[in-house]
Image (cartoon, rainbow, N blue to C red):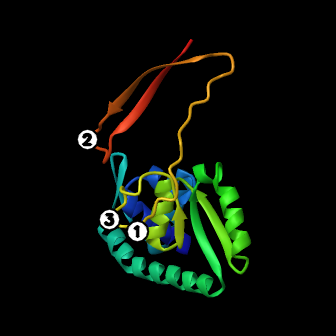
Amino acid sequence: MIENMETLLVLSRTGTMMEASTELRVSQSAVSKRIAALEKYYDKNLIQKKGRRVELTQYGQRLVDKISPILSELRDMFIEERSASGELVIGVSDAILSSWGPGVFHEIKKEMPEVSFVFHTHRTPVVLDRIRSGEFMVGVCTGSDSLDTDLQSEVLTHEAMVIIPSACKEITYLSLIHISEPTRRYAISYAVFCLK
């Protein structure tokens, strides 16, 4: 039941089944089934579809308002228990765990043998959301430290970006394109290469 309520909270925040399923790391079908189980339990419609988006009904919003502080308290309780036991729950961007992260985390573990590290790997936006919700104690993420001003952050390293061509082709650098989108908080630069 708690998992279903957590799903309703995430859905209320994200507004779409797809975004909720991505954040929860479950299928869209699982999100739908969890919401359907809650609606059956309460015998009320909790959501209504508005095109591709989903909005809470009046009853759904009242339920979210009631369960949100309770779930927050539960998270806090688990975090306190983990902290007291010497357990550190870390959210890590999957890109970091597939590159330099394992070596660094192994060295830290050797220096702190009394701490039990629990790693959860997700995309950066999911890690940030779970830090906000209190599920993760700390996060190690890729991206800019200036994008999420509600969280305290510290730059650990500036990682070089490289292009690796096929051994059969030579790369010729053509140009650098700067693209600014009004929906983004920052400009994106693309390097355009040509294979001979």
- Of marks 3 and 1, which one's residue comes earlier in the chain? 3
Q: Which of label 3 and label 1 is nearer to you?
A: 1
Give the spatial CA distance, label 3 vs label 1: 34 Å
Q: Amino acid at mark 2?
A: Pro
Number of marks in the rendered image: 3
Q: Residue at x 31, y 45 (%)?
A: 184
Nearer the observer: mark 3 or 2; the answer is: 2
Q: Residue at x 50, y 52 (%)?
A: 142
Instruction: Please state which of residues 178 and 76 is positioned toward the viewer in this rendering.
Output: 178
Residue at 45%, 52% in the rendered image:
19
Q: Secondary structure at mark 2?
A: loop
141 shown above or below 109: above
Q: Is residue 139 left or right of residue 53?
A: right
What numbered label is drawn on residue 5?
none
Q: Are marks 3 and 2 in contact (CB under 8 Å)?
A: no
Residue type for callout 1: Gln
3D distance between C-alphas at marks 2 and 1 = 25 Å
Disc 2 or 1, which lies upstream in sequence? 1
Disc nearest the viewer among 2 and 1? 1
Residue drawn at x 51%, y 57% as measured from the top left: 141
Question: Residue type at mark 3?
Answer: Thr
Mark closer to the chain start, 3 or 2:
3
Mark 2, Cα crowd under 10 Å, few <14 / some 14-19 / many 20+, is: few
Name the mark on residue 57: 3
Q: Which mark is residue 182?
A: 2
Residue 149, given in percent of the width and then of the height, sits at 34, 63
Instruction: State how far apart marks 3 and 2 are (Cα).
Output: 32 Å
